[in-house]
Image: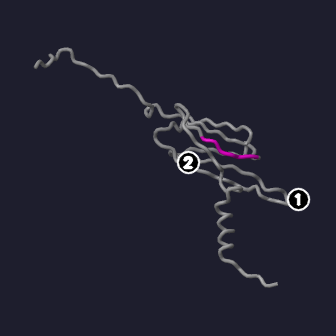
């Protein structure tokens, strides 16, 4: 049987391994939004043990690492579509967020981070002082 090599098919295969596909992403998918005085970030991590999730903040860079271990070699795989190994995602947080008070929870395969807005970044009213000793200008 004659096999032809297709360089574009090989490029597609390599790109899918590096960047993933819509149905099988190679990175952690996430949603982020602002809710009142905090930012909320949710990562989808189904089937990952919470003890295998590591969250670090260093100089306004938040890093989330998670690991889904490989299956032991005694099984005969019929399909292997779920990515395995170590996954990492970094978010650059602005100066307007309080990185000292990041909260994390894990429920039903979703890691939720709550990052409060820093006090100095919250809107506030400025009062205007008046000097009663000045006289009004008359026309």
Q: Is residue 115 left or right of residue 4?
A: left
Asked whether residue 122 is drawn in magenta, I would say: no
Separation of disc 1 and disc 2 at Cα? 37 Å
In front of the other: 110 or 85: 110
Q: Is residue 2 left or right of residue 35?
A: right
Task: Give, as a single range, the part of the protein colored magenta.
Answer: 41-46
Specify the farthest residue to the left: 139
Q: Earlier in the sequence, mark 1 or mark 2?
A: 1
Residue at position x 65%, y 63% from top? 18
Give residue 8's quadrant in the image. bottom right
Residue 91 badge = 2
The C terminus, quarter of image: top left
- Asked which colour scheme the image uses, the reply is one colour
The N terminus, quarter of image: bottom right
Percent coordinates x, y for residue 15 in the rendering = 64, 66
Residue at position x 68%, y 73% from top? 10
Residue at position x 61%, y 44% from top? 31
Q: Is residue 18 left or right of residue 116?
A: right
Percent coordinates x, y for residue 74 in the rendering = 89, 59
Residues packed near mark 1 inside 10 Å, few (<14), some (14 to 19) or many (20 plus): few
The image shows residue 104, relative to residue 87, as above or below, that is: above
Residue at position x 73%, y 42% from top? 109
How many discs mark residues in the rendered view?
Answer: 2
Secondary element at image label 1: loop
In front of the other: 85 or 126: 126
Residue 75 badge = 1
Percent coordinates x, y for residue 61 in the rendering = 53, 47
The image shows residue 120, relative to residue 24, as above or below, that is: above
In front of the other: 101 or 9: 9
Give residue 85's quadrant in the image. bottom right
């Amino acid at each position: 049987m004659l096999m032809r090599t297709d360089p574009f098919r090989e490029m597609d295969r390599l790109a899918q391994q590096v960047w993933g596909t819509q149905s099988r992403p190679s990175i952690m998918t996430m949603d982020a939004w602002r809710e009142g005085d905090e930012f909320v970030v949710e990562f989808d991590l189904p089937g990952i043990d919470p003890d295998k999730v590591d969250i670090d903040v260093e100089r306004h860079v938040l890093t989330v690492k998670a690991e889904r271990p490989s299956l032991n070699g005694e099984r005969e795989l019929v399909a292997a579509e779920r990515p395995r190994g170590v996954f990492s995602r970094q978010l650059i947080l602005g100066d307007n967020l309080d990185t000292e008070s990041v909260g994390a929870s894990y429920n039903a395969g979703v890691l939720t981070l709550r990052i409060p807005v820093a006090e100095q970044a919250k809107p506030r009213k400025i009062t205007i002082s008046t000097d009663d000793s000045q006289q009004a200008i008359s026309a």
